[in-house]
Amino acid sequence: MAVPQAAFIWTLPLQLYAIGGFSAYSLIANIITSPLFVVLILGGIVSGIAGVIYIPAGAVLAWFIKPVTSLVLAIVTAIGNLPGNFRSTGTIELWQLTLAYGFILLVWLYPWWQRQQQFQGVKFPRWLIAAFLVTAILFIPQTFQRRTTLQATIFESGRAPVMLIQAKGKNILINTGNKSQASFNLLGYLQKQGISRLDWGIATQTIPDVSEGWGTLLAKGVTIGEFADAKDLSIAQIYQQFIRDLNQAGVKPQGLEPDKKITIDSNVTIDVLQINPTALLLTIGDSRWLFIGDMNPKQQRQLLSQKEKIKGAILWWSGGEVLGELIKGAEIRLAVASTTEVVAKVRADLEKLNVNVLVTGREGAIGWRADREVQPLSELDDSSTAL
C-alpha cells in the first residue's frame, strides 16, 4: 500500500503539469498490480541470469512469466476503460509545479513537518498543513480561471468550422471536425483547459467532415448537457450512432430552427438566422459573431433582411463565396476563415472594404477573450502568461 501511495503523491504534480489530469483509479491499479510487478521483476532477473549462462534456459523462464505480463496488461486496460477514469483538471503552470514539489520535499526532509501539532486541544500531523497547501496550489488557480474566463476559440480543422466558447464555467462547442481532428486537436485542448463536460453541443451540419468527432468525444468521457443540430437531408451512419448514444445518456437533441434563440446564460446567446445551410448570430460578452455555412448568393441576400441584427458582427465562415454586398451591408470589419485558403475574389472584396482577415490554416487556432482582441491563440496565450 505504501509504495503505490507514495508514487501517486510524487507523480501527481508532474501529471497535472504534463497532461492536465490524472487517472482516478491509478492508485487502485497500482495496489492490484504491485504483487504482479514483483513477480515480473524477480522473474526477469532470474531469466536474465539464466540467459547469460545458457540462452535457451533464459528463454524458457521468460516464457513462464508471459501470462503474468498478459494479466497486468489486461488489468490496466480494464481499469483504463472504466467510466470516469481520466479526470481533467487543466494543466498547471511551472510555478505551481515548483511550489508543490517544494512542500513535498519539506515534509520529506525536515522532521518538524512529521511531528504532531496541537490546535484547540486537537492533535494532528503537521504534514496535513502541507497537504492542504499543495492541494490548494494545484487545483484552486485553474478552478478560478475556468469560473472567470470568457473566451472563444476557433480551431484549425481544415474547412470544418469548430468553435469552443468558455463562458465563466459554462462550455459550448460548435462542431467537432472529423474523428482525427477531434482526437488530436480538440480533446487535447479540452484536457489542457480541464473541461470534461460540455453544457451545450451544437452541430451546424451532420456530415462527417464537420460532426464525425462528436462520437469520439462521447467515447472519451466528455459529457454533453444539451445538444442541438441542423438536420441534413442525408445523415451519416456514424452521426446516427452518436445520436443513439446521446439518447442513451439521457440527452434528447433539439433541432435548430429559424428564429430560434438559445440562451446559455447572460454572457452567451445563439440566434438561429437560417438553416440548410446554417447561419447563426453568436453573442459572446460584448462581441458578436456571424457564422454562415456554404450559402448560395440568394441565401446570402436573404440574410440582408436582418441587416440591423447582424451589423458590425465578426464574420466566421469556411472561406468560400461571400457576396461583397453582404460584407458591406453587414458592415463587417473583421473576418475569420476556417480554411486553408480564402477564395481569391472574396479576399479581394474584403481587402477592398478594409476588412482584416484571419485564416486558421495560416494562423493556427484563433482566439478571442473579453479583455483582448481577436488574434492567433498562441499570441493570446503569450499575453495572458506575461500578465
Image (cartoon, rainbow, N blue to C red):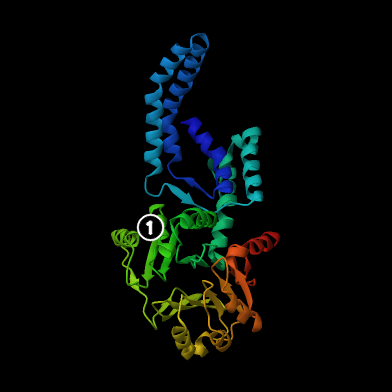
Visible in this render: residue 155?
A: yes
Q: Which image quarter holds the C terminus?
A: bottom right
Above or below, comparing residue 33 to residue 156 in the picture: above
Secondary element type, mark 1: helix
Name the outermost residue toward the right: 386
Q: What residue sits 44% from the left and 16% below the top?
A: 59
Q: Position of residue 299 (x, y in %)?
A: 44, 84
Q: Position of residue 367 (x, y in %)?
A: 59, 67
Q: Position of residue 230 (x, y in %)?
A: 37, 73
Above or below, comparing residue 153 to residue 302 in the picture: above
Q: What residue sits 67% from the left and 59% below the top?
A: 385
Residue named by callout 1: 215
Q: What residue sits 62% from the left and 64% below the top?
A: 362
Q: What residue sits 59% from the left and 48% below the top?
A: 133
Above or below, comparing residue 117 to residue 42 in the picture: below
Q: Position of residue 74 (x, y in %)?
A: 37, 34
Visible in this render: residue 125?
A: no
Q: Quadrant of residue 15?
A: top right
The amino acid marked with disc number 1 is Gly
Q: Nearer the viewer, residue 45 or 35?
A: 45
